Image (cartoon, grey):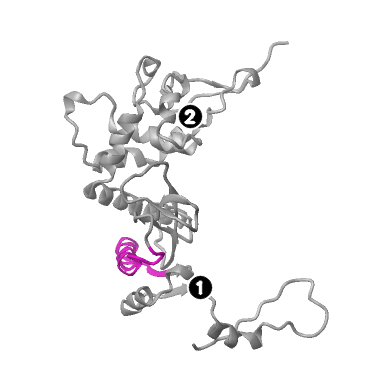
Amino acid sequence: MGESLSTWTPSSNGSVRVELSGQRTTSDSGALLLREALDNSGVIEALEDNLVDRRHPLRIRHSLASQLRTLVLQRAMGWIDLSDTDTLRRDLLWQLACSDARGMTPLALDRPSQATLSRLLTCLGRNDNIDAVHEDLLRRVVWRLTSLKNGERPKQLTLDIDGLPIEVHGHQGGSAYHGLYGARIYSPLIASLAETGDMVGGLLREGNTGPAENADTWIPHLVKRLNESTGAKVRVRIDAGFTDNDTLEALEDRDIEYLGRLRSHKGLQKLASPHLKRPRGRPPEQPREWCHDLEY
């Protein structure tokens, strides 16, 4: 009996047919599924409409959309370094997954080189394009929130603030060696929505920046923009690295509610010590929690 193969055709390219056969399967076939998700989300089209591309129209070989897809899809599939794009340059699947063209046309086209993608990153790093990316992130957050609630906008939201060290393999401007991570890094701030996990914004900082540097101005600005976009009351959740005087004063001056973890020290340990002892008797089968209010 002949082998029965299930097939799937992505809407981005009707000439492509995916057959699930163990002997003829690429490990990167998920790129076509991610392309489908990208097309359905409208993210690439929105960025292409709003980003400023200063290239001369007659000299453009690779559209902004195809380059953005290349960056997003390669990174999502584990091809993190820009040099990986040269490794995949003649890969048929990647030619199909990232191209604007339909049919078999992409197979005859070159993919963007490492140098081309490097220029794209420089383009994305300009202030006007950073603003465009942030605005699109906010639009996607609002769209997702209202979709999950059948068109109803939320009344309260919680914004999570974290540091996200990004290791670099070179001496890029602004990067620096950080002893805690044992590597040369950038030290950006990242904001995400606790309710959905969606990223709301980011702030690139130099590698030797302190944990809370710029947080006192960036967090209130982001809270204001999120409030203007959704109408919701926005609360902030921060780690111990951000509970410094400047950040907390900035939040309190603007009546922004926050929950933050404090760094441990002798004064707090002394206040908490009476509440840290386990009651007499056998330990309970299920963990129990007690909450106590302390003033310091």
- Asked where in the image residue 82 lies, by quadrant, the reply is top left
Residue 8 in sight here: yes
Question: Is residue 214 part of the magenta span, yes or no?
Answer: yes
The x and y percentages for residue 116 are: 30, 30
Q: Give the range drawn in magenta.
A: 210-235
Q: Earlier in the sequence, mark 2 or mark 1?
A: 2
Q: In this view, does 112 lie above or below 254?
A: above
Instruction: Identify residue for label 2.
Output: 32
Q: On residue 261, which mark appears?
A: 1
User: At label 1, which amino acid type do we have?
Assistant: Arg
How far is mark 2 from mark 1, CA to CA?
Answer: 42 Å
Residue 13 in sight here: no
Q: Residue at x 48, y 70 (%)?
A: 240
Q: Residue at x 41, y 38 (%)?
A: 72
- Where, quadrant-wise, is the N terminus in this rendering? top right
Q: Main secondary structure of the magenta part?
A: helix
Q: Which residue is drawn at 43% across and 36% down?
A: 81
Q: Residue furthest right?
A: 282
User: At label 2, which amino acid type do we have?
Assistant: Leu
- Asked where in the image residue 27 lies, by quadrant, the reply is top right
Query: Circle 1 — which element?
Result: loop
How many residues crowd around disc 2 within 10 Å: few (fewer than 14), some, or many (20 or more)?
many
Residues 8 and 226: in front is: 226
The x and y percentages for residue 36 are: 45, 33
Image marks 2 and 1: residues in contact by CB distance under 8 Å:
no
The x and y percentages for residue 41 are: 40, 41
